[in-house]
Image (cartoon, helix red, strand yellow):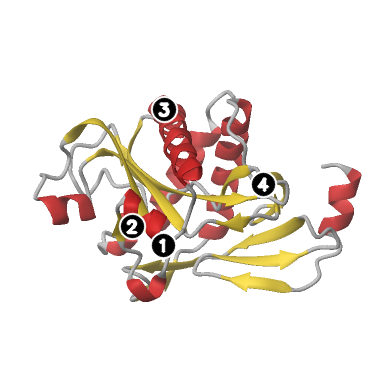
Amino acid sequence: MTEAIRENFMSVQQKLYEGKAKILYTTDDPEILLTHFKDDATAFNAQKRGQITGKGEINCVIATQLFQLLEAQGIPTHFLERPALNQMLVKKVKILPVEVVVRNIAAGSLCQQTGLPVGKILPTPLVEFYFKNDELGDPLLTRDRLLILELATPEQLNQLKEQALTINQILIATFNQCGITLVDFKLEFGVSSNQELLLADEISPDSCRLWNQSETDPNRRVMDKDRFRRDLGNVEAAYQQVLERIMSIRW
């Protein structure tokens, strides 16, 4: 950690925002924020709520590892430093109200909306855009609807898709090293003060569907928040196993 960042971390100012899984605080530097990862868990647009013991620390450490991996592969992110197990210093960005979902295997809402069987491998990765709006239920939007709503520019949408597909390739290879299949995942991006598009939020078992490659049982293989959504139990153990496997990789 640089001395300047260390000083900013020691001078947390006030709560800027609290979401379902994280709290953002300002620092002395207007361009740096402190993110605190919570143990709170939500599902179905916050209709189901609970806690996963240790989730904040686990997700923060996993996200740190993956952000650093992606940065090394040329993907710009908001990550700066992890000063504590459940805290991350990040560049301040204006989050685009667009959730980018990449799907490699049919699961979740894709199966519910299309009738595709769970586990069907898609011929090519599917990139979808969702309106980040809790009141509307985060609806799936076409490109034209996104542009009509002015949620992003045409150039940004092109960049989002390109970045998402590149990130997908990197993460597939990374999780394969851990014996984990990357089924699908959600990304969020933000724009920095110098107008650079940065990967933001987190990449963790909260935002990814992850299946244990050594398990064939459709319930036992789940290593992500679906264990909480579907009341499968052993949520903490699944998250911990993902952490241990990620940390075992030689970067």
- Labels 1 and 2 touching (C-beta < 8 A): yes
Residue at left offset 22%, top offset 55%? 109
- Residue 60 percent coordinates (x, y): 59, 51
Q: In this image, 247 relative to 3: left or right?
A: left
Q: Earlier in the sequence, mark 2 or mark 4?
A: 2
Query: Is there any visible trace of residue 240 in the rendered image?
Result: yes
As measured in the structure, the alpha-carbon distance from the residue carrying label 2 to the one carrying label 4 is 23 Å
The numbered disc on residue 250 is: none
Q: For mark 1, what is the residue?
A: 149
Q: For mark 3, what is the residue?
A: 169
Characterize the local packing of mark 3: few (<14), some (14-19) or many (20 or more) Cα atoms within 10 angstroms: few
Q: For mark 2, what is the residue?
A: 145
Characterize the local packing of mark 1: few (<14), some (14-19) or many (20 or more) Cα atoms within 10 angstroms: few
Q: Name the residue type under label 4.
A: Gln
- Residue 34 percent coordinates (x, y): 71, 59
Q: Name the residue type under label 3.
A: Gln
The N terminus sits in image quarter: top right
Q: For mark 4, what is the residue?
A: 195
The answer to which image quadrant residue 68 occupies is top right
Residue at left offset 11%, top offset 45%? 116
